[in-house]
Image (cartoon, rainbow, N blue to C red):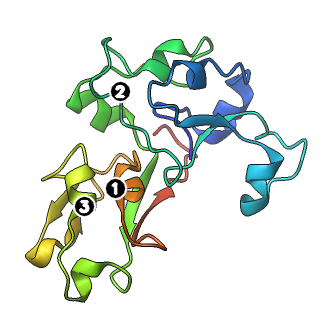
């Protein structure tokens, strides 16, 4: 999935200069360049338009939305010299308005809280706990996709393997 504030995909690919400044600026080191090695899992061919563009694999390292990081804006969006990542201020309202990297999905067949045990780790990891993700009975994760920005902190925190909660990147054909 793309970092916060990314333009719609086609426009993003034409504007991003693959300078890696967003990844260098990321305090959580979650942004990496898309490579053919990473692309094998995602049908990317060497030399494709996506090669070298910034991506986030939340299970490896999620976006923490620059929590506890100095500055008024998300660091990656502030570092982008071309506007491929639109500037996003570090307020809950602006993050909810301008960040839509993906949406969490819960596999109730895998989630321990849906199968008689109590967990809730994903709910506690969510920066929008209570709105994007809240705990139901036995701490079952209850998702409101309208508030989920797709940061991946829930996926990264999931102690189940394979993880019971994953982020599905959003189709970004229009401004996200």
Q: Which residue is mark 1?
A: 154
Asked which quadrant contains residue 144, the reply is bottom left
Q: Which residue is mark 2?
A: 66
Measure the alpha-carbon separation of dots 3 and 2: 20 Å
Q: Is residue 173 left or right of residue 130?
A: right
Q: Where is residue 24 shown, x and y percent of the image?
A: 58, 20
Residue at 40% from the left image edge and 58% from the top image edge: 155
Badge 3 or badge 1: first in the primary sequence: 3
Against 3, residue 76 (above or below) is above
User: Can residue 58 be seen from the camera position used here?
Assistant: yes
Residue at 25% from the left image edge and 88% from the top image edge: 115
Q: Secondary structure at mark 3?
A: helix
Against 71, residue 136 (above or below) is below
Residue at 15% from the left image edge and 60% from the top image edge: 134
Q: Which residue is mark 3?
A: 121
Q: Where is residue 75 shown, x and y percent of the image?
A: 44, 19
Asked whether 129 or 61 is in front, the reply is 61
Mark 3 or 1, closer to the camera: 3
């Amino acid at each position: 999935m793309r970092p916060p504030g990314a333009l719609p995909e086609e426009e993003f690919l034409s504007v991003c200069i693959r300078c890696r400044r967003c990844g260098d600026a990321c305090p959580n080191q979650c942004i990496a360049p898309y490579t053919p090695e990473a692309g094998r899992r995602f049908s990317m061919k060497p030399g494709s338009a996506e090669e070298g563009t910034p991506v986030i694999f939340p299970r490896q390292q999620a976006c923490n939305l620059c929590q506890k990081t100095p500055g008024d804006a998300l660091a990656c969006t502030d570092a982008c010299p071309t506007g491929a990542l639109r500037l996003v201020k570090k307020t809950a309202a602006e993050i909810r308005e301008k960040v839509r990297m993906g949406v969490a999905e819960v596999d109730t067949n895998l989630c321990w809280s849906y199968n008689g045990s109590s967990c809730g780790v994903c709910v506690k990891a969510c920066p929008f706990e209570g709105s994007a993700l809240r705990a139901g009975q036995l701490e079952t994760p209850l998702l409101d996709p309208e508030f989920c920005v797709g940061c991946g902190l829930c996926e990264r925190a999931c102690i189940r393997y394979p993880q019971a909660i994953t982020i599905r990147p959003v189709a970004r054909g229009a401004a996200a």
